[in-house]
Amino acid sequence: MNRIIIALAFLVSTQSFIVAQNKPEALEKGEAASVSNNLVKVETLLPSIIGFSYEKKLDQHISLYSSLSLLGGFGGGTYSRTFYYVDNYYILTPQIKVQPRFYHNIAKRAANDKNINSNAANYIGFSGSFYHTSFFMTNAENYPKGPGIFDLQISYGWQRSFFKRMNIDLAFEPGIEFSQGQAEFFIGLNLQLGFVLFSN
């Protein structure tokens, strides 16, 4: 009986020693975890057809994301032939966006030995974006011109990196759209597949 008690005590003390040895290392990784100093990407998918983004470190877990992109639309059929005199049309509208981000779980991911390269973590953000519906590129004739549009959005995002230079950014973005003195609530979805040009 005494041998069993001694053996159990030895196992418990050994396990506690191993945990004590591993815990500081995990904590050190978490405490040292930081967003990238500079992150430059080319992005595509939704809502931007193509875009260029730059993310700058402001603090250990905070960055400033900015992008210049093209919002895309297309159509075709009888409507297109009747009003735009083409079988199929496209429209590309430039947009600028600025978004402070707080990566709230980057330390936890690092402590758990998960990939945090290129800011691979979950974030909370607040963004402002602007585009003008009178400035666009299109192959359609007589495409209608409209006002400038300014969006304010709160974001909760999920960003991950894979294949060294690939990056995916998915965010749920409710916000308010301002145009011609009116405000309207909307729910946005951001899904961007990015290729990392530079990260340090």
Image (cartoon, rainbow, N blue to C red):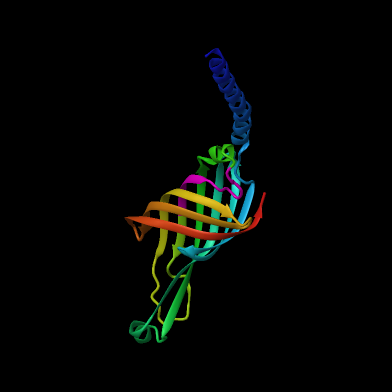
**Which residue reaches farthest front?**
1
Asked if residue 103 is positioned above or below residue 14 in the image, the reply reads: below
Front residue of 45 and 186:
45
Residue 141 lies in quadrant: bottom left
Spot occupied by residue 148 in the image (x, y as percentages of width and height):
42, 63
User: As drawn, is 141 to the left or to the right of 44?
Assistant: left
Spot occupied by residue 175 in the image (x, y as percentages of width and height):
38, 52
Spot occupied by residue 8 in the image (x, y as percentages of width and height):
54, 20
User: As drawn, is 134 to the left or to the right of 51?
Assistant: left
Front residue of 183 and 160:
160
User: As drawn, is 74 to the left or to the right of 102?
Assistant: left
Residue at figure coordinates x 36%, y 55% from the top left: 187
Front residue of 48 and 32:
32
Residue at figure coordinates x 57%, y 19% from the top left: 7
Spot occupied by residue 164 in the image (x, y as percentages of width and height):
63, 55
Asked if residue 150 is positioned above or below residue 10 in the image, the reply reads: below
Span of residues in magenta: 114-128
